[in-house]
């Protein structure tokens, strides 16, 4: 039973355009959400997070949107750059639980 | 700059061997975590620890144990390695302000192959 779903295993986006990565969750107890980025042969690195009391958080080119009623969050990257090519993991957490999605591989095309 | 190091990048072991994976963090973080990453399954939490000598089971603790004798070091132990434990193992640490919700800092990973 997947509590955190990233339904797109991969996504290709033209350089300079917007990349939108999606994540759905099923457990309404989750109240803090994070996005991590992972390059091959490296550990994941934290990108951006959002608390359930907010619906948007922005950090430079990265914006995370949270729709609690739909149990959906998305990560927007604009403009997309070649260095953004990586696997992106969505994570949802509650008091003593953190669940990661399966990841979405983002390819930025020249 | 937070640094999380793992003792080996690549490890090959035989079925039935006892395997130790070591993780050290240098930022005095309270929390440490062990995950495994498998294709199509993402990151799955094996065990985590909030403090020295404390441990909590994650989602897939079966076949694993952990040890946290010092704050900076968190070891993952495979008592009797099996082929289905072939995986990428990732260690992480975080400060304690929000516990498991905190930003986690990951090590580079250990790719373990069990033959």
Image: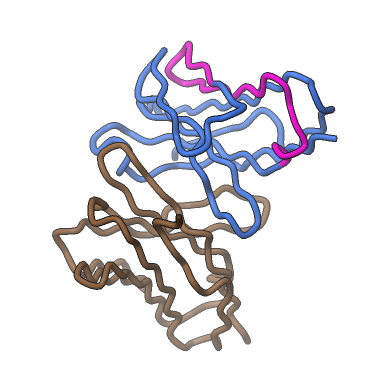
> Is residue B94 inside the magenta stretch?
no
x then y, percent, for residue A59? 30, 66
x then y, percent, for residue B40? 61, 60
Residue at screen point 55% across, 88% down: A14
> Is residue B75 inside the magenta stretch?
yes
Residue at screen point 26% across, 59% down: A50
Name the tint of chain B in the rendering: blue
Above or below, comparing residue A5 to residue B70 in the picture: below
If the image is split into quadrants, where does the N terminus of chain B sit?
top left
x then y, percent, for residue A87? 56, 64
Above or below, comparing residue A65 to residue B21 in the picture: below
Name the tint of chain A in the rendering: brown
What is the image's colouring?
by chain
x then y, percent, for residue A86? 58, 66
Q: Quadrant of residue A47?
A: bottom left
Q: Quadrant of residue B93?
A: top left
In-image side of A74 versus B60 (left or right): left
Which contiguous range is marked in magenta?
Answer: B66-86
Above or below, comparing residue B3 to residue A66 in the picture: above
**Between B29 and A106, which is closer to the camera in this rendering?**
A106
Residue at screen point 73% across, 18% down: B18
**Between B7 and B80, which is closer to the camera in this rendering?**
B80
């Amino acid at each position: 039973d997947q509590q955190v779903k990233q339904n797109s295993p991969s996504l290709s986006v033209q350089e300079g355009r917007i990349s939108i990565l999606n994540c759905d969750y099923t457990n309404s107890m989750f109240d803090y959400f994070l996005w991590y980025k992972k390059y091959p042969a490296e550990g994941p690195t934290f990108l951006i997070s959002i608390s359930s009391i907010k619906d948007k958080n922005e950090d430079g080119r990265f914006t995370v949107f949270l729709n609690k009623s739909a149990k959906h969050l998305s990560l927007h990257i604009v403009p997309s750059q070649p260095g953004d090519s990586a696997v992106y993991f969505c994570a949802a957490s509650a008091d003593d639980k953190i669940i990661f999605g399966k990841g979405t591989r983002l390819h930025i095309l020249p | 700059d937070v640094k999380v190091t793992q003792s080996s990048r690549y490890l090959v072991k035989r079925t039935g061997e006892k395997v130790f994976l070591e993780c050290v963090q240098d930022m005095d973080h309270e929390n440490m975590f062990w995950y495994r990453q498998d294709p199509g399954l993402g990151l799955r939490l094996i065990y985590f620890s909030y403090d020295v000598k404390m441990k909590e089971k994650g989602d897939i603790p079966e076949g694993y144990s952990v040890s946290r004798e010092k704050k900076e070091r968190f070891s993952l132990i495979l008592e009797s390695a099996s082929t289905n434990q072939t995986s990428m193992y990732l260690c992480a640490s975080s400060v304690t302000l929000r516990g498991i919700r905190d930003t986690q800092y990951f090590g580079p990973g250990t790719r373990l192959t069990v033959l």
